[in-house]
Image: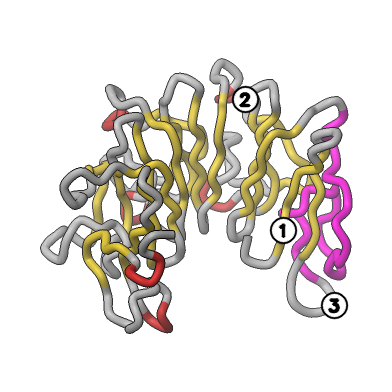
């Protein structure tokens, strides 16, 4: 995440976390260890309140954490602003709580952005909640959603993988198509220079002929996508060489990283 790390211990499916914040007293709620504030936790320690839960995957956002159980349930903790925890309110939690609105959904992946969350179900459905500014939730508006809502624009698309960035979201489907929505002012949606600044519903990203994407990753103002042939594509803000093209230029469409050709 921003100032914290969450991990899973494979031997027993236990979740551990560390980090906190700057200064002698930081916000520890995102660690899920039952403490609201205090000095940074410098060594990974167990996440509380998960007795009997085998954790399969975790996602660390800017100020919150999502945890996916092997049972398909999703737990959340941290800053509840904008409803990013998915419990129907904006209350913050120092101990993970299972998201009730997903109890009938078998989740297989979770993704935590700056202030929004994404969940992928075994059926390939996408659910989003949290801050809706710039359309990052994909519901056609900019309203906050304190509870998980299925993304209707992907109703007939079987999504295989998703990623939540700073203010945008990415998803791939079983056919290798790439979808993007949210804030695109820096080119991070890959929809071209003429695309609107805000994409309120998922839009299919134009790809070079024959390219199929198997995994995408959304950063703050840039994005990465790995094709089935192993090629890496990047797009968005290129400041400080973020995109790997040997310059600092913005790329408005997915561009293959030449330095990794053949890798």
Dot 3: few (<14), some (14–19), or many (≥20) neighbours within 10 Å? few
**Location of residue 78 in the rendering, given as x and y in whole percent from the top left corner:** 69, 51
Residue at figure coordinates x 52%, y 58% from the top left? 114
- Is the residue 150 above or below the residue 256 in the image? above
**Does residue 71 appear left or right of residue 144 in this picture?**
right
Q: Nearer the viewer, mark 2 or mark 1?
A: 1
Residue at figure coordinates x 46%, y 47% from the top left? 163
The residue identified by callout 2 is 100
Which of disc 1 and disc 2 is earlier in sequence?
1
Tell me the distance, in whole angstroms, between the alpha carbons under discs 3 and 1. Answer: 18 Å
Residue at figure coordinates x 45%, y 32% from the top left? 127
Badge number at residue 103:
none
The residue identified by callout 3 is 24
Dot 1: few (<14), some (14–19), or many (≥20) neighbours within 10 Å? some
Residue in the foreground of this view, choosing between 200 and 173: 173
List the single residue furthest toward the top.
104
Which of disc 1 and disc 3 is earlier in sequence?
1
Helix, strand or loop for disc 1: strand
Tell me the distance, in whole angstroms, between the alpha carbons under discs 2 and 1. Answer: 25 Å
Are the two marked residues, 2 and 1, in contact with CB atoms closer than 8 angstroms?
A: no
**Location of residue 67 in the rendering, given as x and y in whole percent from the top left corner:** 68, 39
């Amino acid at each position: 995440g921003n100032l914290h790390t969450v991990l899973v211990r494979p031997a027993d499916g236990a979740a551990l976390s560390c980090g906190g914040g700057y200064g002698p007293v930081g916000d520890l709620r995102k660690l899920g260890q039952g403490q609201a504030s205090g000095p940074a936790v410098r060594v990974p320690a167990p996440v509380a309140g998960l007795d009997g839960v085998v954790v399969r995957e975790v996602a660390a956002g800017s100020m919150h954490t999502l945890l996916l159980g092997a049972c398909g349930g999703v737990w959340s903790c941290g800053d509840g602003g904008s409803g990013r925890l998915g419990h129907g309110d904006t209350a913050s939690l120092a101990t993970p709580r299972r998201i009730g609105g997903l109890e009938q959904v078998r989740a297989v992946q979770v993704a935590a952005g700056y202030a929004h969350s994404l969940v992928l179900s075994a059926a390939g459905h996408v659910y989003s909640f949290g801050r809706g500014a710039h359309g990052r939730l994909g519901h056609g508006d900019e309203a906050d959603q304190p509870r998980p809502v299925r993304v209707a624009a992907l109703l007939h698309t079987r999504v295989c993988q998703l990623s939540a960035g700073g203010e945008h979201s990415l998803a791939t489907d079983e056919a290798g198509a790439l979808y993007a929505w949210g804030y695109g002012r820096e080119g991070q949606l890959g929809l071209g220079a003429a695309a609107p600044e805000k994409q309120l519903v998922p839009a299919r990203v134009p790809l070079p002929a024959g390219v199929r994407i198997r995994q995408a990753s959304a950063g703050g103002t840039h994005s990465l996508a790995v094709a089935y042939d192993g090629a890496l594509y990047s797009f968005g803000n290129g400041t400080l060489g973020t995109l790997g093209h040997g310059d600092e230029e913005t790329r408005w469409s997915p561009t293959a990283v030449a330095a990794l050709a053949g890798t």
